[in-house]
Image (spheres, grey):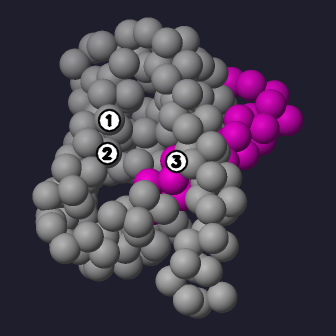
Amino acid sequence: MAAALVAISFAAGLNVYATVATLGLLAHAGVLPLPAGLQVVTNWWVIGASVALFLVEFFADKVPAFDLLWNALHTFVRVPVAALLAYGATSQLSPEKQLLATLLGGAIALAAHGGKTAVRAAVTPSPEPLSNIGLSLGEDALAIFLTWFATRHPYVAAGLAVCFLAIIVILVRLGRLTAPSRLVRIGLI
């Protein structure tokens, strides 16, 4: 379950509502036996609320500028929910290991969410809307795919999530290194 948690935490950092709804639907379909601590996501009210919020996010995420506000506010939703998913999934472990899994789940979601938000902030000023819409659709699809794929091939899904995390770290470091020269070029420094 640890490998699957890496991928699911990453997916929750991209789109928590799609992740929770996918987990619940997969459990109802008999594809995914969930640990006792995650049974709450199989409740039809939870699935319904997740699908409804996914639909709201689906449209909200396509509106330039509003998507940045939406993503900023969802820092306080995606990360804690990912941490709670990790906590529930590891309820059979010792308290120390459960706490570690909870912190790692939250940290992975924070990294995914931060990378998503940084990319969106870079793309949003673009005058054409298609790149924003394309990114949003890709994020939604990746969150659903990674959640499903983690149930079938947890280690490969975790490997993909780790590769995405490495790309995020590289891009952030590259952005931090080149930002001062870009500011000088446009006359802000």
Reading the image, the residue beneath label 2 is: 139
Binning the other alpha carbons within 10 Å of mark 2 as few (below 14), some (14 to 19) or many (20 upward) gives some
| Amino acid type, callout 2 | Glu
Tag 1, which secondary structure?
Answer: helix
Split into 4 quadrants, where in the image is the N terminus?
A: top right
Tag 3, which secondary structure?
Answer: helix
Chain part drawn in magenta: 92-117
Give the x, y percent position of residue 74: 44, 67
Give the x, y percent position of residue 91: 66, 31
Using the image, tell me which numbered label, if any, was put on residue 51: none
Q: Is residue 54 visible?
A: no
> Which SS type dominates the magenta stretch?
helix
Q: Is residue 177 visible?
A: yes
Give the x, y percent position of residue 88: 58, 37
| Amino acid type, callout 3 | Ala
Give the x, y percent position of residue 138: 26, 42
Q: Is residue 2 magenta?
A: no
- The residue positioned 52% from the left and 68% from the top of the image is 76
Tag 2, which secondary structure?
Answer: helix
Q: Is residue 115 magenta?
A: yes
Picture layout, residue 127 above or below residue 147: below
Label 3, label 2: how far apart the Cα atoms are: 10 Å
- Are circles 1 and 2 on residues that touch, CB within 8 Å? yes
Reading the image, the residue beneath label 3 is: 112
- Are circles 3 and 2 on residues that touch, CB within 8 Å? no
- The residue positioned 19% from the left and 73% from the top of the image is 127
- The residue positioned 36% from the left and 18% from the top of the image is 149
Using the image, tell me which numbered label, if any, was put on residue 142: 1
Towards the viewer: 184 or 9: 184
Image quadrant where residue 31 sits: top left
- In the rendered structure, the answer to whether residue 22 lies left or right of residue 6 reads left
